[in-house]
Amino acid sequence: MHQSSRTKKPDVKIVILGDMNVGKTSLLHRYTERKFKDTISTVGGAFFLKQWGPYNISIWDTAGREQFHGLGSMYCRGAAAVILTYDVTNWQSLAELENRFLSLTDTANADCIYSIVGNKADLTDSLAQVPDIEFQKGDDPQPVVTCPTPPATPILHKQVSREDAMALYGRMLRYKGLEEKACLPAEKMCFETSAKTGYNVDVLFETLFDLVLPSILKKRSEGESSTVDLETPMEMKRTKAGCCV
């Protein structure tokens, strides 16, 4: 078989859940493509394969619309980490995580790691309005702006505080039947991000990648194949964005 017909198999899966319009797809684009762009609502789901050092991590973007709600548990099946996303300017988006999306995670791995993320922080926090800057490699690095400087953005009312998200994290652990003292602390697993400027986006994903490393090593030690045969027939579903799942 030609090498071109084989591709790397993901070592672990990370799933992003949350109501529509909270910016799930934009977060993923910001991290994987290093830029912000307006997106259309995800239909069903789509995934991106991220190479992290020697490992391959699939990040699943799921639809927030209620008509696609039943697909969520399927996408969460076997997940090593789940990112529960809300909009810091919309209290209802946090409530929806508990009312609609938390139960979908029942199919995730028993040792699944959970993070609660408040997106659109640039709308409520002037610090989050500053674009992220990367530096080129070299002796005299030059700054490279990964997001154009946004126009002056009025500070909107913040409906969801970080303390609210941390309280939800605690309730989620109780829902899972887990002891808070034995789990990762809420302070480490609750983030506020901006997909528009890149604020805290890298920190979010890199933190989760570090935390799922034991799951990756466990799977590899069990001798699971690191490649998948693309010539093997499989049922595929095309999303509105053109990705197959």
Image (cartoon, rainbow, N blue to C red):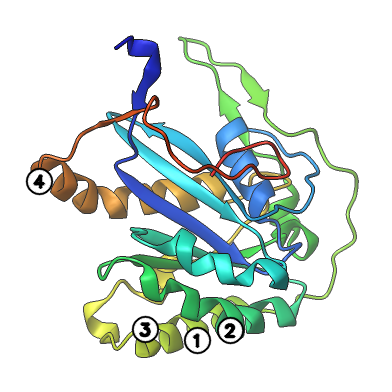
Q: Nearer the viewer, mark 1 or mark 4?
A: 4
Q: Nearer the viewer, residue 194 or 229?
A: 229
x and y, in percent, of residue 141 in the image: 54, 15
The answer to which of marks 4 and 3 sits earlier in the sequence is: 3
Amino acid marked by disc 2:
Asp
**Residue 117 in sight in this render:** no
Amino acid marked by disc 3:
Leu
Amino acid marked by disc 4:
Glu
x and y, in percent, of residue 180 in the image: 30, 84
Task: Residue under label 2, please give it.
Answer: 164
Q: Nearer the viewer, mark 2 or mark 3?
A: 3
Q: Nearer the viewer, residue 202 or 8?
A: 8
The answer to which of marks 1 and 4 sits earlier in the sequence is: 1
The answer to which of marks 4 and 2 sits earlier in the sequence is: 2
Query: Do tag 1 and tag 2 residues touch (Cβ < 8 Å)?
Result: yes
The reply, left or right, for residue 231 in relation to residue 217 is right
The crowding category of the residue bearing disc 2, from other C-alpha atoms within 10 Å (few below 14, some 14 to 19, many at least 20), is few
Height in image: 51 above or below 196? Answer: above
The answer to which of marks 1 and 3 sits earlier in the sequence is: 1
User: Which mark, by number, is residue 222?
Assistant: 4
Question: How far is mark 4 from mark 2, CA to CA?
Answer: 40 Å
The residue lying at 55 percent from left, 78 percent from top is 165
Task: Residue under label 3, please give it.
Answer: 173
Amino acid marked by disc 1:
Ala
User: Which mark, by number, is residue 167?
Assistant: 1
Local secondary structure at mark 1: helix
Question: How far is mark 2 from mark 3, CA to CA?
Answer: 15 Å
